[in-house]
Amino acid sequence: MVRGAAATHAGGMEKIRTSLARQGLVRSTDQAVIAGVCAGVGRRLGLTPWVTRLLFVVTLFVLPGSQILVYPLLWLLMPSEDSIEAAAAAPHLPR
């Protein structure tokens, strides 16, 4: 029973990551400072990574503590560019 729940949870995470990747929200590996979240969000919004990081810090003063929750959540949910490229290069197996 526990094994089935873990598989369902992993499948749900994969659906979220696939959805974010289709929307262009992927963590940058070449411009990452910590995990590439700000660089990935900035790329999606058409901003440079440093402008996105600056906005992130500014919102820390406006909404204190929110980034402590949002950044790790995005780190977990946003796929990295490397994982997207690996998935695209892998041969597709029939189900």
Image (tube, rainbow, N blue to C red):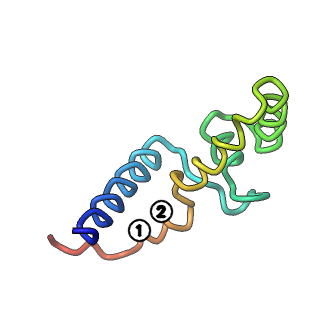
Report which residue position mark 1 lands on.
Answer: 87
* Labels 1 & 2 near each other (Cβ < 8 A): yes
Residue 74, placed above or below residue 4: above
Q: Residue at x 16, y 72 (%)?
A: 94
Q: Residue at x 66, y 46 (%)?
A: 71
Along the line of sight, the residue nearer the viewer: 46 or 65: 65
Q: Taking 85 as reference, is 38 left or right?
A: right
Residue 33 lies in quadrant: bottom right
Amino acid type, callout 1: Ala
Amino acid type, callout 2: Ile
Q: Residues within 10 Å of mark 2 (few under 14, many from 20)?
A: some
Residue 32 lies in quadrant: bottom right
Q: Residues within 10 Å of mark 1 (few under 14, many from 20)?
A: few
Q: Position of residue 52 (x, y in %)?
A: 76, 37
Report which residue position mark 2 lands on.
Answer: 84
Q: Residue at x 55, y 67 (%)?
A: 82
Along the line of sight, the residue nearer the viewer: 89 or 71: 71
Q: Position of residue 50 (x, y in %)?
A: 83, 42
Residue 31 lies in quadrant: bottom right
- SS at badge 1: helix
User: Quadrant of the image for the C terminus?
Assistant: bottom left
- SS at badge 2: helix
Q: Taking 65 as reference, is 14 left or right?
A: left
